[in-house]
Amino acid sequence: MRTIAFLQRRPDLSRAAFRAHYEEHHAPLALPLLEGLRHYVRNHRLDDDEGARAAGALPFDAISEFEYASRGAFDAMRARVASDEGAALRADELRFMHKPGNHYFAATLEPASDAVRPAPGTAAKWIVLARSRPDAGRAALRDRVREAAIRLERSGHATAERIDVAQDGDRPRPAAYDMR
């Protein structure tokens, strides 16, 4: 079970303040509640283009990835976060996130190649957001994105370890488990 979250900072916080709070306070607070978690990555935007946010070009400040061994482990985590045990975590989210702007969706993992994964901290990560054309299905989009990743690998411009493909909808949508 994998979910991807597009997270927005509160409008009164800088991107640096959002990142510092997420990394130094929120993630350590969350980890004890995320039992069964196999993979947790927080991808923070590096650009500092406030104008792009104001124009609505990129309405998120971080993309977080969560992977659980099973749907059961995911459901157990949701129950912990919704319980009294998760009250401090839910309250902390309001200190740095703009909760109405957060979106979550399930994703599948699609292997892109036999590439060896680089050591942590030694490579940049590119996340490409793509939407299928109205006349084409998601399978066609997934195939086109995979073909583009392979072309980039062959040209020496990038190495793709995997491609995450959204399962539901053409754009992120609020999740049923978003605790406010």
Image (cartoon, rainbow, N blue to C red):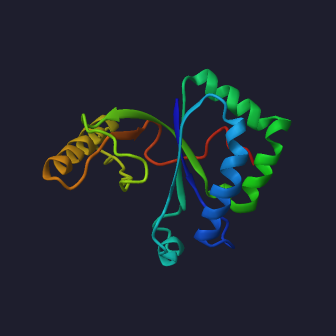
Would residue 149 be found to the left or right of residue 8 on screen? left
Q: Residue furthest left?
A: 155
Residue 58 in the image: above or below residue 115: below
Residue 118 in the image: above or below residue 12: above
Q: Looking at the image, how many numbered discs can be counted on the residues?
A: 0
Point out residue 102 in the picture as x, y percentages from the top left corner: 61, 53
In terms of image quadrants, where is residue 33? top right
Would residue 9 be found to the left or right of residue 164 on screen? right
Point out residue 171 in the picture as x, y percentages from the top left corner: 46, 48
Residue at 43 percent across and 48 percent down: it is 120
Residue at 71 percent across and 55 percent down: it is 25
| Depth check, front residue: 103 or 83 | 83
Would residue 78 be found to the left or right of residue 124 on screen? right
Q: Residue furthest bottom?
A: 51
Residue 128 in the image: above or below residue 47: above
Residue at 34 percent across and 45 percent down: it is 118
Point out residue 98 in the picture as x, y percentages from the top left corner: 67, 60
| Depth check, front residue: 162 or 137 | 162
In terms of image quadrants, where is residue 126? bottom left
Residue 27 in the image: above or below residue 1: below
Point out residue 100 in the picture as x, y percentages from the top left corner: 66, 56
Would residue 66 be found to the left or right of residue 119 on screen? right
